[in-house]
């Protein structure tokens, strides 16, 4: 990075550290913090969509659909999330390849599961073995996002289901009295009002989501945990220009601080948001605001 | 090999009894069930240890956070903030790295890096922080009347805590504490994926489930079995905690369901 970094073995103290912290691998490490933030930014809305779909399904009057919605939330909540992460990444991958195999190689006669192997034709491989490295990485990341969205969608469905129930019945009855159809009542009356009831649960969920992001490492994505392990491990002079002992504790200490910052910023944003959302609402918080203003 | 034979060989494999070699090929359903169930021993062990010790530590920590003296309150707040604000996964990695360096510089601490002690300590500290926050919230919402009644009867000090504050705190905190216990048992699945090494392939349920999934390329058998065991465990936790919760609330007026007798509904 800097001009004096050409021969690291002659450096000492601060200049050694400045060179050490700007090596190519460290740059990749810093970029992987971006991966975590991108994951959060994509997963949160997708999970919310899954949750909305799940909650609506659970409320459905057609019982197979409501059973589907309810068992989705119940099963995902009853099992450790880490087990789901490890399951879905393989299951989704095999599912996609199976579908592509059925479409692209319909003349293939051999069975797909041969003993302990999962065999699909070469054109059905995802991603194709000829595709460049970044496609493989993006595919892995997309699988991870989908897995996160499925798992956290179940939690969100539970929160939104409760929030929909919490909307005062009188509001819905008024809408019906005005002659709104069930669909109109749902979209115009219930959905706009449910957010203030859902907010505490959703903020809690956001915190859990932040704290689940290191599990990306288990899904094979090169995230901050991967790089921290890689960079913190003992380096000897034979393999590295910057030999050092086992520095894992420092790297993971740094990650700990990063996550603490992320959660405390979120907490502050949540406080502001709940203040904003309860403005003018018929809840205790809204009432307190009204009294303070007069 | 019959299923009884498999159970004899592998039921206690995770704690080092029985057959040393794991199955290599022709994985049967029986082997799946037995080995993953054997791994559950570790999950239950970690969960129980952390809950048992964490419960008492959390009570103390909640009281410390409620203290009026800043010298007592601030460290408790900081401890809770650190453990609730960061992922357990990172805490495990960090703790393992720290334990490793302690072991290298101070002799006699070599046990810390083995999962049964090191990971149990991390889980204990983690659940202490979460439970303390729950207990603190309960402590804040103890009905004022209870404390005034205690004052009126002249109950003070330790007796006041033991007879009045603590039972009310438990009663109010119990539903949330049940949730925390469930999440703790789920969190025990992280142990062998976060730095702590698996010694002689004696792992927990998730370790064996992922072992089978890696070998057979078929996630649809081992993971549902794992889910089955964890749902059983969750139901057991809910049942036990529900019993305790009922006992804690037994002095309160219960909603009496009076069923009209059959004859009375018939002739009215």
Image: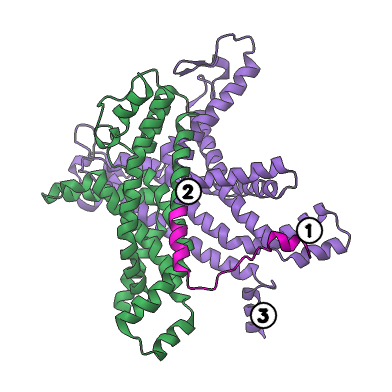
Chain colours: A purple, B green
Residue range (magenta): B239-268
- Can residue A264 be spotted in the picture? no
Asked if disc 3 and disc 1 are in contact, CB closer than 8 Å, the reply is no
Q: Which residue is mark 2?
A: B235
Q: Specify few, some or many for label 3: CA neighbours under 10 Å numbering under 14, 14-19, or 20 or more.
A: few
Is residue B96 rendered to the left or right of residue A197? left
- Residue in the picture at 22% in, 49% down: B99
Q: Judge by depth and name the residue closer to the eye, A221 or A208.
A: A208
Q: Answer yes or no: are tags 2 and 1 on the same subunit.
A: no
User: Mark 2 falls within which chain?
Assistant: B
In the rendering, at what x and y percent does residue B223 appear? 46, 34
- Residue in the picture at 43% in, 28% down: B213
Q: Secondary structure at mark 2?
A: helix
Closer mark to the observer between disc 2 and disc 1: 2
In the rendering, at what x and y percent does residue B169 appear? 42, 72
Separation of marks 3 and 1 at Cα, in angstroms: 25 Å
Closer mark to the observer between disc 2 and disc 3: 2
Q: Which mark is residue A290?
A: 3
Q: Is residue A175 magenta?
A: no
Q: Is residue B245 magenta?
A: yes
A265 w.r.t. B191: above or below: below
User: Mark 1 falls within which chain?
Assistant: A
Q: Secondary structure at mark 3?
A: helix
Separation of marks 2 and 1 at Cα, in angstroms: 39 Å
Q: Specify few, some or many for label 1: CA neighbours under 10 Å numbering under 14, 14-19, or 20 or more.
A: some
B259 w.r.t. A63: above or below: below
Q: Specify few, some or many for label 2: CA neighbours under 10 Å numbering under 14, 14-19, or 20 or more.
A: some
The mark nearer the N terminus, 3 or 1, is 1
Is residue A210 rendered to the left or right of residue B107? right
Asked if disc 2 and disc 3 are in contact, CB closer than 8 Å, the reply is no
Q: Which residue is mark 1?
A: A188
């Amino acid at each position: 990075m800097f001009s004096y970094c050409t021969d690291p073995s002659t450096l000492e103290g601060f200049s050694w550290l400045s060179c050490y912290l700007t090596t190519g691998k460290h740059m990749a490490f810093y970029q992987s913090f971006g991966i975590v933030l991108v994951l959060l930014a994509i997963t949160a809305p997708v999970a919310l969509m899954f949750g909305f779909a799940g909650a609506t399904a659970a409320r459905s009057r057609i019982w197979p659909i409501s059973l589907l919605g309810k068992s989705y939330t119940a099963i995902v909540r009853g099992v450790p999330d880490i087990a789901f992460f490890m399951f879905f990444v393989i299951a989704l991958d095999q599912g996609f390849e199976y579908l592509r195999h059925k479409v692209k190689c319909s003349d293939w006669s051999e069975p797909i599961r041969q003993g302990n192997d999962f065999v699909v034709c070469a054109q059905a491989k995802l991603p194709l073995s000829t595709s460049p490295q970044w496609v493989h990485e993006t595919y892995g990341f997309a699988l991870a996002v989908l897995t996160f969205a499925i798992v956290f969608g179940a939690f969100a469905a539970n929160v939104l289901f409760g929030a929909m129930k919490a909307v005062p019945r009188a509001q819905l009855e008024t809408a019906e009295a005005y002659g709104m159809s069930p669909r109109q009542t749902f979209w115009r009356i219930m959905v706009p009002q449910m957010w203030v009831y859902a907010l505490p649960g959703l903020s809690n969920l956001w915190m859990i989501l932040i704290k689940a992001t290191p599990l990306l490492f288990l899904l094979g994505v090169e995230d901050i945990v991967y790089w921290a392990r890689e960079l913190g491990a003992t380096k000897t002079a034979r393999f590295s220009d910057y030999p050092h002992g086992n520095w894992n504790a420092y790297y993971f200490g740094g990650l700990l601080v990063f996550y603490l910052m992320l959660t405390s910023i979120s907490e502050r944003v949540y406080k502001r948001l709940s203040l904003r959302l309860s403005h003018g609402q018929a809840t205790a918080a809204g009432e307190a605001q009204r009294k303070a203003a007069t | 090999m019959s299923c009884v034979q498999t159970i004899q060989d592998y039921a206690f494999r995770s704690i080092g009894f029985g057959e040393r070699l794991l199955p290599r090929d022709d994985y049967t359903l029986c082997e799946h069930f037995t080995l993953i169930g054997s791994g559950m021993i570790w999950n239950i062990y970690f969960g129980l240890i952390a809950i048992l010790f964490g419960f008492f530590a959390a009570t103390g920590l909640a009281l410390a956070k409620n203290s009026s003296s800043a010298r007592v309150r601030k460290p408790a707040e900081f401890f809770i903030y650190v453990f609730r604000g960061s992922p357990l996964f990172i805490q495990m990695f960090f703790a393992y790295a720290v334990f490793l360096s302690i072991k290298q510089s101070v002799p006699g601490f070599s046990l810390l890096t083995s999962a049964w002690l090191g990971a149990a300590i991390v889980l204990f500290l983690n659940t202490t922080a979460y439970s303390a926050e729950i207990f603190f919230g309960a402590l804040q919402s103890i009905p004022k009347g209870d404390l005034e009644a205690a004052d009126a009867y002249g109950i003070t000090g330790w007796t006041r805590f033991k007879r009045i504050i603590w039972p009310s705190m438990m009663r109010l905190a119990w539903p949330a504490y049940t949730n925390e216990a469930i999440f703790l048992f789920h969190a025990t699945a992280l142990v062998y994926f976060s730095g702590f090494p698996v010694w002689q392939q004696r792992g927990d349920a998730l370790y064996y489930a992922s072992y089978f999934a890696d070998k057979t390329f078929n996630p649809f058998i081992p993971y549902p079995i794992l889910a089955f065991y964890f749902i059983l465990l969750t139901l057991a936790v809910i049942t036990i905690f529900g019993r305790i919760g009922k006992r804690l609330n037994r002095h309160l007026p219960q909603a009496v369901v009076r069923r009209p007798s059959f004859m009375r509904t018939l002739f009215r």
